[in-house]
Amino acid sequence: MAKLSEEEKARRAANRRREAALAAEEDAIRQENKRQEWVANGTYLTRAELEDGGHCRGCGLPIIDDLGGLPPLMRMTAQEREAHEAGEADFKRRHAECHAGRWSVSGSRTTHCGFCCPPPPLSEQQIEAIVSIFARAGPDPAEPDTWRLALTCGHVIDKTQHASNTYWSASTTHCPTCGQTRGIVTPEKLVPSPARRSVEHRRLAMKLDEARREYDRHQGKADAARRRIDKLEAQSAALDPGAES
């Protein structure tokens, strides 16, 4: 087989990236269409309906079945393992073409499809906890990095994400020109702004100071240990019979 040129390798790599982006785009649009279908058909349960024992409007199975969760596979009894395997087989039969994850609620064994079954509504306590987390985590406006995203439609957009991310964390995004979700072919991190560089400089300076203090602490301990070794060696040498001659 002839050896591929660097140009051919680059072309094939670009084709693979585009194919992956198109596949991600197709799946994201499929998920969006399903969510819109749930809204249009009133498929979502209210919290009251869920707590009253309402069944999932996607698959018809109970969400809260009061059966209790199963233990880890290695700790299941023969009867529990049989029930688990039967449930797995039934799930795969009903959702073989869904290509999605699955979910269940604590204390229940019934598993629901991430594509067919709308997620259960959150409780007021869960909503308050989430709001509290986001309220405490307000980012410094100087911290985000800007990324340039080339999309499957040919448009290029700039978006930001927190600087702690070393790669672009999503495979699709909304294209404002097309007005719909598109796959991301290539993400490129842009040169940080002066404000971002200033923040990064301060962060590195703090880490450098911390590392120096840690070094000084360890060095002090090492020096003390060296002095103790020297003292013990001197005491040992003084007790050595050969030292008197």
Image: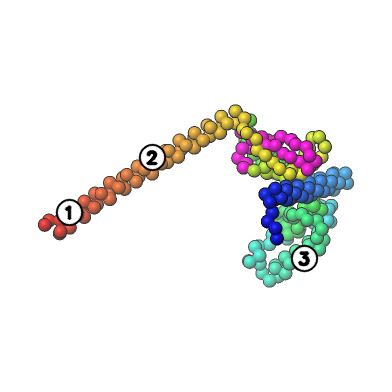
Question: Residue 39: image x %, image y %?
Answer: 85, 44
Residue at position x 79%, y 35% from top? 176
Q: Earlier in the sequence, mark 1 or mark 2?
A: 2
Q: Nearer the viewer, residue 36 or 242?
A: 242
Q: Residue furthest bottom?
A: 78
Residue 118 numbered mark, or none: none
The residue at which mark 2 appears reads as 216
Residue kind at label 2, given as amino acid type: Asp
Q: Is residue 12 in sight in this rendering? A: yes
Q: For the N terminus, which image quadrant?
A: bottom right
Q: Is disc 3 surrounded by few (<14), some (14 to 19) or many (20+) residues within 10 Å?
A: few
The residue at which mark 1 appears reads as 238
Judge depth for marks 1 and 3 and give the one in front. Answer: 1
Q: Residue furthest top?
A: 194
Residue range corresponding to the magenta coloring? 142-166
Mark 1–mark 3 distance (CA, rounded to whole Å):
80 Å
Q: For the C terminus, which image quadrant?
A: bottom left
Determine whether, in the image, residue 245 is placed left or right of residue 142: left
Residue 89 numbered mark, or none: 3
Judge depth for marks 2 and 3 and give the one in front. Answer: 2
Is 149 part of what is drawn in magenta? yes
Question: Residue 46: image x %, image y %?
Answer: 80, 45
Q: Is residue 42 in sight in this rendering? A: no
Q: Nearer the viewer, residue 228 or 51?
A: 228
